[in-house]
Amino acid sequence: MGNIYRGALLHDIGKISIPDSVLLKKGPLTEDEWKIIRTHPATAYEPLSKVEYLRPSLDIPYCHHERWNGSGYPRGLKGEEIPLAARIFAVVDVYDALISDRPYRKAWSKEETIKYLLKNSGTLFDKRVVKGFLEILRSDS
């Protein structure tokens, strides 16, 4: 469990290399700005992989933007090529991002966010992970 905890804490550490002008932009990102954003998993992985005790935690910072259908980044992993910890964290991270205000948009409702996860279950996200996450979410309500 410590590896998942550390991975979750470090998941966006690579964003320290992203200029604030991109990270905090209020409007839509340009394609060049998206290229910059997509560097943050590798930016995290490179230095952290040199720390032996952190290596087992790096699936989350390195792979949490990979998508079930292979459309994610940084490596375009698909399905079960994506480490389980990263598949789980991807759902948690997207849920948290959507229910939170961002500089470029207002928070979505929990209902809208759940609909988004269900709609993209099996496409962007592992169906089993979405199902389990929603069961936990409903049991906490």
Image (cartoon, rainbow, N blue to C red):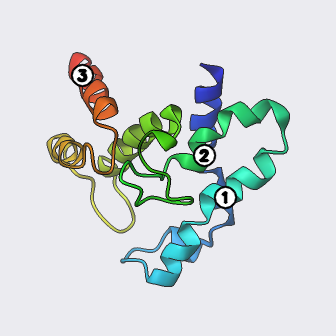
Label located before the other in sequence (3 or 1): 1
At which x and y percent is residue 18? 62, 68
Q: Secondary structure at mark 1?
A: helix
Instruction: Decide which of tag 2 and tag 1 comes sooner along the chain.
Output: 1
Callout 1 crowding tier (Cα within 10 Å): few <14, some 14–19, many ≥20:
some
Residue 33: x and y, percent? 51, 78
Left/right of residue 91 with respect to residue 53 in the rendered view = left
Which residue is denoted by mark 3 in the rendering? 135
Q: Amino acid at mark 2?
A: Pro
Quarter of image, res 105: bottom left
Residue type (three-letter) at the residue carrying disc 3: Glu
Element at label 2: helix
Q: Quadrant of the N terminus?
A: top right
On the image, the x and y values in percent for residue 136 come to 29, 21
Q: Is residue 127 left or right of residue 103?
A: left
Relative horizontal placement of residue 107, taking residue 66 as reference (left or right): left
Q: Residue at x 43, y 43 (%)?
A: 90
The numbered dot on residue 104 is none
Specify the label residue 61 is tagged with: 2
Of callouts 3 and 2, the N-terminal one: 2
Element marked by disc 3: helix
Q: Amino acid at mark 1?
A: Ala
Q: Which residue is mark 1?
A: 42
On the image, which quarter does residue 52 sit in? Answer: top right
